[in-house]
Image (tube, rainbow, N blue to C red):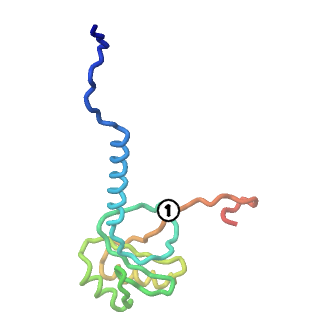
Amino acid sequence: MKINLNLRRKGPRIEMLPLIDIVFLLLVFFIYAMLSMVVHRGFKVDLPQATTAEIDKEDYASITVDKNNRILLNKEEILIENLSEEVNTNIKKGIKIFINGDKEADLGVVINVLDTLRRDEIKEVYFETEPFEQKPLNNSGIPGF
């Protein structure tokens, strides 16, 4: 006697959960790889905060004034007397220039850098800041005290 159970053989199937895990790991890898390729031209300083700060990813040059009032053009230290010559020879015309001034830097040095750039008729000059973070109010109603 023959018993017919109507069992069909199922073909191989692709499990989706391991596939989703692999795709997610690839996505994380490529995002991390992309972020590690970002070009950082400036020198690390403690930037002031501003409420209107925006992120701009276009090509730019960076002039840094650190807390010791040293001036760096794209991480190379220069003197204020040579700033005009260095900018005119090493930086393309029409490129944006960002000034990174440390909070503890002398304001006069930063203004002198800006004045030198304006004398050379460079109009695309911006100050680099960090986005403003609102500090919670304390009992006196004054932020940060």
Residue 98 location (% of width, % of height)? 38, 73
x 31%, y 86%: residue? 84
Is 110 on the left-hand or right-hand side of 140? left
Q: For the point 30% across and 64% down, which residue is it?
A: 58
* Residue 76 position in % (x across, y down): 35, 85
Residue beneath the point at 66% across and 65% down: 144
Per the image, the residue denoted by label 1 is 131
Q: Quadrant of the N terminus?
A: top left
Farthest-out residue, right: 139
Could you tell me which residue is drawn at 30 percent across and 18 percent down? 7
Residue 9 shown left or right of residue 130 in the figure: left
Characterize the local packing of mark 1: few (<14), some (14-19) or many (20 or more) Cα atoms within 10 angstroms. some
Q: Residue furthest front?
A: 1
Of 130 and 43, which appears nearest the observer? 43
Q: Position of residue 33 (x, y in %)?
A: 33, 61
Tag 1 secondary structure: strand
Image quarter of residue 118: bottom left
Please indicate whether residue 81 sits to the left or right of residue 88 in the image: right
Q: Quadrant of the C terminus?
A: bottom right
Indicate whether 80 appears above or below 41. below
Q: Is residue 123 above or below residue 11?
A: below
Q: Residue furthest top?
A: 1
Which amino acid type is marked by label 1?
A: Pro
Location of residue 34 (image quadrant): bottom left
Q: Establish if 6 lies above or below 47.
A: above
Depth check: give the residue in front, 142 or 59.
59
Report the label total: 1
Name the residue nearer the viewer: 65 or 31: 31
Residue 39, image x, y percentages? 33, 70
